[in-house]
Image (cartoon, helix red, strand yellow):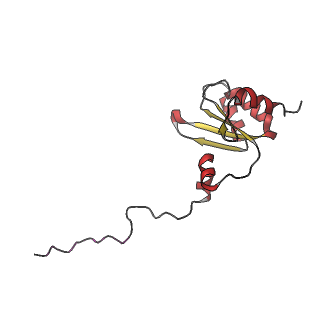
Amino acid sequence: MAPDPPKYRPLERFWPYADLPEQPTEAELASLDPALHEALFGASPRPFSITLVFPSLDVPDFSKALELAKSSAEFRQTGTGTNQRFRARFWSGDAARLRDLFQIVGPSDATDVLIDDRPVPYARELWLPLIWLLIPR
């Protein structure tokens, strides 16, 4: 006895998978983590930078800190809730704004200082004061 023919015949495609483009969009590439972007596409030439990565803090001047971070060379906000982190990259010419932001978020142990996107020993104690020497007096 032959079974009844099916009443529904699926299309010859990988349903329910989305029909995604083969190449990522510019917005997707811009939102990649810098370490992942470097691993996928190689190191892109850019000037020396110092990056501050900090969570949402309960300090009086935090709104000013966000304004300073958003005015940096590159600003990213990732995560939500308690996992929310802000990432602000500064070039050496932005030493004054870097210092102003670090004075607000620096006392927190949750604030990370990255030199060219890498954690470096003594970044707070050595590298930041060296950059602050670039501030005109």
Residue 103 in sight: yes
Q: Nearer the viewer, residue 121 or 98?
A: 121
15 above or below 90? below
Q: Which residues are magenta?
A: 2-12
Q: Position of residue 132 (x, y in %)?
A: 81, 31
26 above or below 61? below
Q: Position of residue 135 (x, y in %)?
A: 84, 33
Name the residue: 67% across, 41% down.
117
Left or right: residue 136 versus residue 101 is right
Residue 31 in sight: no
Q: Main secondary structure of the magenta part?
A: loop
Q: Residue furthest right?
A: 137
26 above or below 135? below
Name the residue: 62% across, 58% down.
26
Image quadrant assignment for residue 24 = bottom right
Left or right: residue 133 versus residue 107 is right
Q: Nearer the viewer, residue 74 or 66?
A: 74
Image quadrant assignment for residue 94 = top right
Name the residue: 52% across, 32% down.
82
Left or right: residue 80 versus residue 63 is left
Quarter the C terminus occupies: top right
Name the residue: 65% across, 54% down.
42
Image quadrant assignment for residue 101 = top right
Q: Residue furthest left?
A: 1
Q: Position of residue 128 (x, y in %)?
A: 75, 30
Q: Position of residue 97 (x, y in %)?
A: 77, 35
* Total marks in image: 0
Quarter the N terminus occupies: bottom left
